[in-house]
Image (cartoon, rainbow, N blue to C red):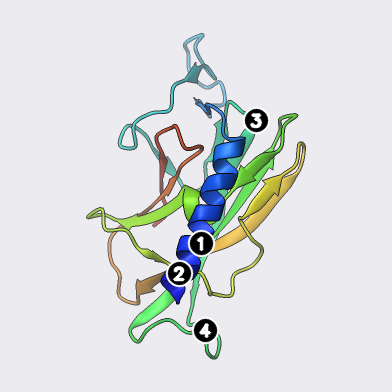
Amino acid sequence: MKQVIRSLLILLSLLLMASCSDNTTVVNPNNGNDSNDNTNQETENPAPSTKVYGSNEIIEFSNGLSLQILETRTDMGVEYMEPEEGNEYFYIMIQFINNSEESESISSLMQFELKDDNGIEQEMAIFAEGVGSLDGTVLPGDKMTGEIAYELPIDVEGPLYLYFLPDLFSDPIKIKIK
């Protein structure tokens, strides 16, 4: 049943994103501390392994959208919505700010992946009780803040990386979460 719901949500998100996508580029989030005159210069989206952002960085995109990881937390779920034995829910609180004059669509299922240091993708916990939502439209000048959840082994070790795909036609950015 989870697979059917996930497939339907992915299809719906894909259609929504295809109708709203544009060519997004990453803007250098450097605060002008570079001695070159090229600070804050737009560059094409880097390949996923080119730049690894820290979880506290504000990542700005040329379409006016910015993303920041606010915090992470874990829990064991609530009755009837618990992770499998030996697992826990891992939540990532993310904030988007839209500084453009265009609405931007966000889909947690289509635009986010969590992988461990070996590149193994972790399962998104669709029915976990997170705060807020990262699915919908961010209006011009507005914010969207919410959590996405993944089901991870309790004893997971090593770094975790969150991948965000700004649009269907770009490479994902990589953020070290843990």
Read off the residue under disc 3: 64
Residue 146, how many percent across, how many down? Answer: 63, 59
Residue depicted at 66% across the width and 54% down the height: 145
Is residue 87 shown left or right of residue 92? left
Is residue 141 shown left or right of residue 3? right
Read off the residue under disc 4: 81
Measured along the vertical axis of the image, is residue 42 above or below residue 80?
Answer: above
Q: Which SS class for mark 3?
A: loop
- In this rendering, the label closer to the viewer, 1 or 4: 1
Q: Which SS class for mark 4?
A: loop
Read off the residue under disc 2: 4
Q: Amino acid at mark 1?
A: Leu
Give the mark nearest the N terminus, 4 or 3: 3
**Is the Cβ of the residue at disc 1 closer than 8 Å to that at disc 4?**
no
Residue 129, how many percent across, how many down? Answer: 59, 75
Q: Residues within 10 Å of mark 4 (few under 14, many from 20)?
A: few
